[in-house]
Amino acid sequence: MTERRAPSLGELISSGDRSFSFEFFPPKDAKGEEQLWRAIKELEPYRPTFVSVTYGAGGTTRDTTVAITGRIARETSLMPMAHLTCVGHTVPEIHRVLDELRAAGVRNVLALRGDPPGGPHTAWVPTEGGVDFASELVGIVREAADFCIGVAAFPEGHVDAPSLDADVEVMLAKQAAGAEFAVTEMVLRASDYFGLVERCRAAGVTIPIVPGIMPILSLRGMSKMVELSGRHMPEEVLARIEPLADQPEELRAEGIRISTELCRDLLEGGAPGLHFYTLNRSKATLEIFAQLQITV
């Protein structure tokens, strides 16, 4: 009898059931590692579709990313997905990373171009012997056969894209190369997400697109994250949180309400799920889940 193949991550997200997922980053020290694993254990009972672990600029956290995703695969019930970027890697090095992930029991990769080596808002510098585009990286991972591949999407268009139409062409190229699903950078307005989906569907992109959620916990922190992505905080959001700038607890509470409203609008509008940028903490995500009445 032929053994039945388990559904891929892309198939799970496409199944029609709401997908919930969490993103973590490799910690810098022992205290950060303790915080990371505490967050993972607190979120595990919610049975997310997957959890992802980011990859530092230029591959700076390569070994840690492999180690964390491998430990998640071995020691938890969660399905891990490792980020992988083009930055600073030759094609043979990319294959070595994939071999390491496979050996660690990780079968899901988020294939990204990554930020330029000089950081956000600097010029892209190609790596000799490497690849320049996420679609090329997707093709390399696809050749490795047994990986499910996710990619990034951008609700307001990638910062380097000359137009929204050009941005959608990139999505088409990623899909053609073998991507099974996409996760967006943080969504600031539900209308931006639905606009992206509409553009993609009109152009022939059929893979599911999961919106990314960054809970608003402070004005300074959120403003910095938005600035790094090359965008601007929506005026309607600023109008609600700026008056609370000197009241951090009240601002945080209002930020959670705003984030919850966004999540509700996205789900009610047909988003296949939500992907939470946790910053290695569980509290804000659990508060949003409570307000959405999502329980263990």
Image: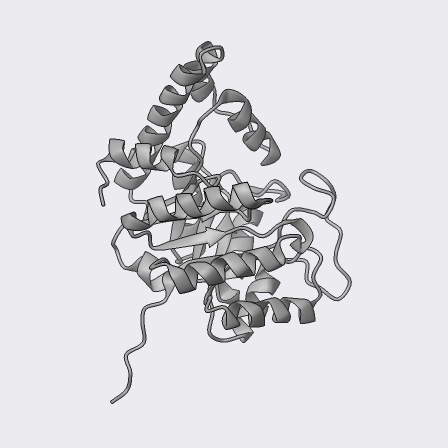
Residue pictured at 33% horizontal, 38% vertical: 266
Residue pictured at 31% horizontal, 29% vertical: 261
Quarter of the image with the N terminus is: bottom left
Residue pictured at 50% horizontal, 52% vertical: 53
Residue 238 relative to residue 11: left or right: right
In this rendering, is residue 277 above or below 52?
Answer: above
Quarter of the image with the C terminus is: top left
Q: Position of residue 23 (x, y in %)?
A: 45, 47
Q: Position of residue 207 (x, y in %)?
A: 40, 58
Q: Position of residue 139 (x, y in %)?
A: 56, 68
Q: Position of residue 87 (x, y in %)?
A: 68, 55
Q: Is residue 265 visible?
A: no
In this rendering, is residue 174 above or below 213?
Answer: below
Residue pictured at 62% horizontal, 53% vertical: 61
Residue 265 relative to residue 279: left or right: left
Report the front residue among 72 and 59: 72
Splitting the image into 4 quarters, where does residue 65 fall? bottom right
Report the front residue among 178 and 105: 105
Report the front residue among 149 and 281: 281
Splitting the image into 4 quarters, where does residue 269 fall? top left
Residue 270 relative to residue 255: left or right: left
Report the front residue among 95 and 174: 95
Residue at the extreme bottom of the image, as rendered: 1
Numbered disc total: 0
The colour scheme used here is one colour
Q: Is residue 160 visible?
A: yes
Residue at the extreme right of the image, as rendered: 128
Splitting the image into 4 quarters, where does residue 121 fall? top right
